């Protein structure tokens, strides 16, 4: 089963949450999902999905 991390980030944003890139390599990202009520980290994941790399681009987080 393949996880669609782009869809996950879009749903998180649509629900009012924010996200931040915690680590970036040439091939992947680690992203923290932050609550909308103070920015506390709710979850994090690492992905090598090229679609996620394209979606995030050079941004450091959802507020960029």
Image (spheres, rainbow, N blue to C red):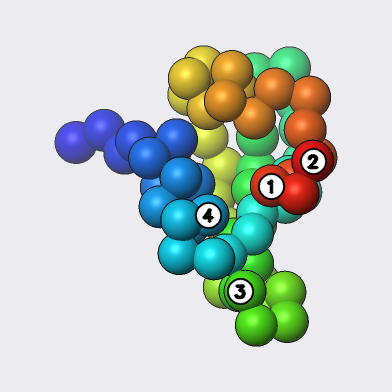
Q: Secondary structure at mark 4?
A: helix
Q: CA distance from mark 2 to mark 3?
A: 17 Å
Mark 2 or mark 3, which has the lower sequence index?
3
Check if mark 1's residue and mark 4's residue have beta carbons within 8 Å. Answer: yes
Residue 64, numbered circle: 2
Residue 58 makes an appearance in the image: yes
- Which residue lies at the image location 62% right of the left edge and 74% below the top edge? 36
Q: Secondary structure at mark 1?
A: loop
Mark 4 or mark 2, which has the lower sequence index?
4
Left or right? Give the position of 29 relative to 46. right
Residue wearing tag 4:
13
Q: CA distance from mark 4 to mark 2?
A: 13 Å
- Which residue lies at the image location 49% right of the left edge and 46% below the top edge? 9
Residue wearing tag 1:
62
Q: Is residue 32 above or below residue 42?
A: above
Check if mark 1's residue and mark 2's residue have beta carbons within 8 Å. Answer: yes
Mark 1 or mark 3, which has the lower sequence index?
3
- Which residue lies at the image location 45% right of the left edge and 35% below the top edge? 6
Q: Nearer the viewer, mark 2 or mark 3?
A: 2
Q: CA distance from mark 3 to mark 4?
A: 10 Å
User: In the rendering, at what x and y percent does residue 30 appear?
Assistant: 65, 43
Q: Residues within 10 Å of mark 4 (few under 14, many from 20)?
A: some
User: In the rendering, at what x and y percent does residue 42 appear?
Assistant: 57, 73
Mark 1 or mark 4, which has the lower sequence index?
4
Residue wearing tag 3:
35
Q: Secondary structure at mark 2?
A: loop
Q: CA distance from mark 1 to mark 4?
A: 8 Å
Q: Residues within 10 Å of mark 2 (few under 14, many from 20)?
A: few
Q: Nearer the viewer, mark 3 or mark 4?
A: 4
Q: Residues within 10 Å of mark 3 (few under 14, many from 20)?
A: some
């Amino acid at each position: 089963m393949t996880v669609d991390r782009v869809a996950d980030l879009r749903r998180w944003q649509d629900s009012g949450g924010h996200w931040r890139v915690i680590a970036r390599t040439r091939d992947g990202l680690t992203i923290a999902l932050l609550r909308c009520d103070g920015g506390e980290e709710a979850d994090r994941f690492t992905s090598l999905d090229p679609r996620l790399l394209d979606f995030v681009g050079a941004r450091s987080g959802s507020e960029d």
